[in-house]
Each structure stands twice: as C-alpha cells, then as structure tokens.
Image (spheres, rainbow, N blue to C red):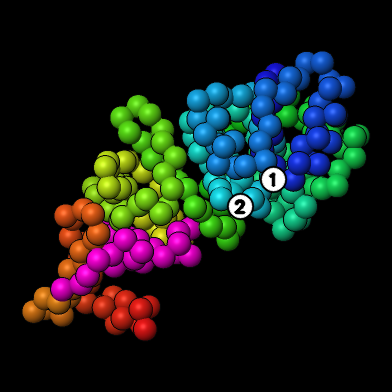
Amino acid sequence: MQVVVIDDERNSIEYLTELLKKKGEFTLAAAFTDSREGLAYLLKNPCDLLFLDIDMPGISGMYIAEQISSLYPQTKICFETAYNGYAAKAFELNAVDYLLKPYTEERFFKCLDKLKNTAAGKEIFKEISGQCAYNLDMICGFKEEDIVLIPAADIFYIEALQGTCMIHTRDYVFRGNKTLNFYEEKLKKNSFFRTHKCYLANLARADRFRPRINYTYDMYFKDIPDVILVSRNKVKELKQYFN
C-alpha cells in the first residue's frame, strides 16, 4: 500500500516513517511538512493510505481530507494530532482511525490493521469539519478537468451562481466545490467579507465603492472590471469594517 504523510512536525514524520519500515506491505511514497505542497502532490498522485495532522498552517488537514476523499474515495485517511478535541467525534462516527500523539508502536500497528480492513468513507470529514475552526490561505478550484490550488490573496471575489460557486481571480474564473457559507467561514480572517447573499469579496482587492439611489453600493476592484453589489443591510457593517 502506498502511504503519504502530511504533518508540520518533522519529528512526527520521522517516527511514523520508522514504524512503517517494520511493515513490508506499506511503502512511504511521500512525506510533507508543508500542507500546501502535500495537497498539491495528492491532487496528482493518489495514494492508498494518508496520515494527516489536523492543525497545520496554510491548509488544515481537515480540508485536505475533504478534498481527497471527494476526488479519490478509495483513499483511506487517518488523522494524527496532539489535540484530542476531535477524537470523540471521529470515534463516534467510526469511519476513520485517529492517532493521538504521542502514540505507541503497538497503537500504530493496530491502526494499520484497522485501516486495511475498513472501507473508506467521506461523510465523516464534512461532519467533523463543521466543528473545526481553521483558516485557509489556499483553496481548491477546478479549471476544466484540472484541480488548481488558489492562494486566497489571488481571489477577488467568490460568486454563488445557480448552485455553484465561481472563484474569480485576475486571469481566470475557477469553479469551487464548496458552498459560499463554507468559504465565508473559512476565509473571514483573510479580509473576505460577505457583501450580498451571492457575493463574498476580498476587501484587500477592493478599489472603491459607489452608492446607488436605493441605499445599496457597487464595489469596484483593482485590476479587473467586475462590479459586485453591496446589499443595503451590509452597508453599515462594511463601513464599520473600515472604520
């Protein structure tokens, strides 16, 4: 079985690697301390078994799990983290295993045995993710058949359009695979603001605002000609944001 590890603690990767060497049927295909590099690799190189830390800078392990389980449902995923706040929910759903650091060699081997005999499933990641407060500095977008990692800073706005979110950058409009509510929650600390039920704007990319006669505003952006609406009930909140 091909194994990939993504954990921002190098000593954790080294420990897990040494344990894997004792099981000949498992091969470490790649290991990453940078979650963004790890996700970029997995998008092109699916694996049989993925070990994921949850709390990592850049992209949360939970977000990676959601993406990979949707794209490659055959991949079995195990969380490994020092924080036990997610463990109860993970075991309650009984869909994946969960290694709480520091774990023993015996516990790790039990985990491998369980994962070999457990069917992969993706619903758990949606349920646990809703309970996790994590931020994203990159998100996945779809460009025809390709999956692209998009830095949050490159996004001008995200638009909900006929049940699909469209991610607008300077040069391309990508298709998203999450709801606008999801992006609003996960990107709110990256200067993103919900201007309207259909728009989530990166205020760092805003250029100016123009009032309309009906107490709404138009938002203009730097470098692109697009204009989006700021609804009447969001105008006051937007002014408070800048003040």
Where residue 187 is drawn, which disc sits there? none
Image quarter of the N terminus: top right
Work out which residue is located at the far front of the displayed protein and give it.
Answer: 223
Which segment did they paint magenta?
A: 186-210
Residue that mark 2 sits on: 57
The answer to which image quadrant residue 216 occupies is bottom left
Mark 2 Cα within 10 Å, few/some/many (few <14, many 20+)?
A: some
State the count of labels: 2
Residue 33 in percent (x, y) is at 67, 41
Is residue 237 in view from this perspective? no
The question of residue 201 being in magenta is answered with: yes
Where residue 8 is drawn, which disc sits there? 1
Which numbered disc flags the more N-terminal residue, 2 or 1?
A: 1
Amino acid type, label 1: Asp
Residue 147 in percent (x, y) is at 41, 33
Q: Contact (CB < 8 A) between labels 2 and 1?
A: yes
Q: Nearer the viewer, residue 13 or 183?
A: 13
Q: Is residue 221 left or right of residue 104?
A: left
The answer to which image quadrant residue 143 occupies is top left
Q: Nearer the viewer, residue 134 or 10?
A: 10
Residue 51 in percent (x, y) is at 69, 36
Amino acid type, label 2: Pro
Is residue 55 in view from this perspective? yes
